[in-house]
Amino acid sequence: MVALLQPPPVERRHPIRSILGDPDDLKFRSSMTLFAAAAPEEAIFEAALEKFFGGKRDALTMSRLQEDAPPPKPGPEVATRSSWKKCLPVPEARVALGFTASYSGEDFEKFKRGSIPRQMEDKWFIFYEEPWLFFHRSWTGHGIYGVRFETDAASVIAVESWVSRDPIYKSTSVEYDRKILRFLIEAMLLGRQMPFPIPGGLTPRAPAGAFQHGLIGRGYPEKRFEVGGTDDSAS
């Protein structure tokens, strides 16, 4: 499939139907939709949908996925470990993240509420168990980040943090993981406008926005970017 994603010379470009034929083009779209939902950390599936179908998923496959997925467990508005259908234990393979930040008491109250996925595109389940704030992938249930807070009279401070290094999680850059964690806190929990941190080293042929969608989903406004550069403003 990687070969399909490499753009041929202009004079040789054809619609996907002319490459695979009918109905295999429809099967391809359905498969990419399914794989993108099941493995959101693998950007290649989003890239295929973006290139051949303008980023639009197969509606019938999406409908069937929504029918098959069990609904979130009913519960209070505040997220707890039992608020979501799948929440795995903290991974044994993890490393210190070195995330440091200071927040207000009002911010901390938002952390305690967490974030419960409401639709398929919500890719993070976040909940607070004193004194830790946990970040899990909603589809797989894997714990990716943890942050421990301490409070004083004036502020709430992140004093300890970790990131998963379980093989299921592909990232190997602690520096970039710190930026993603900061983005999740600022944009998703606190509702602040913040640019998505684009990593260096993306292939110049990657469709704009595919990486962000695979990691964050469409719950946060997607940023279109020119691939090849970096945006490290979320440091």
Image (cartoon, grey):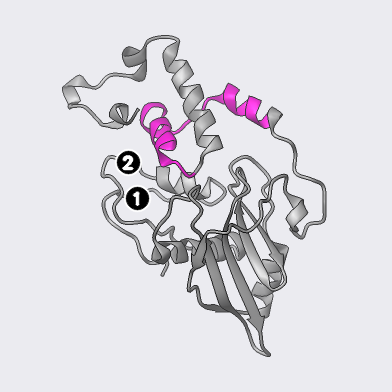
Which quadrant of the structure image shows residue 184? Answer: bottom right
What amino acid type is highlighted by mark number 1? Phe
> Of 81 and 198, which appears nearest the observer?
81
> What is the quadrant of the C terminus in the image?
bottom left
Decide if residue 19 is on the left or right side of residue 44. Answer: left
> Of 194 and 24, which appears nearest the observer?
24
- For mark 2, what is the residue? 206
Magenta span: predominant SS is helix
Residue furthest top as drawn:
22
Q: Look at the numbered disc 1 and give the secondary structure of its residue.
A: loop
Is residue 63 magenta-colored? yes
Q: Residue at x 47, y 17 (%)?
A: 26
For the residues labelled 2 and 1, say whether their Cβ atoms are less than 8 Å apart: no
Between disc 2 and disc 1, the foreground one is 2
Is residue 19 magenta-colored? no
Q: Is residue 193 visible?
A: no
Going from N to C along the chain, the mark reached first, 2 or 1, is 2
Give me the disc on residue 97: none
Which quadrant of the structure image shows residue 136? Answer: bottom right
- For mark 1, what is the residue? 225
How packed mark 1 is, by other alpha carbons closer than 10 Å (few <14, some 14-19, many 20 or more), is some
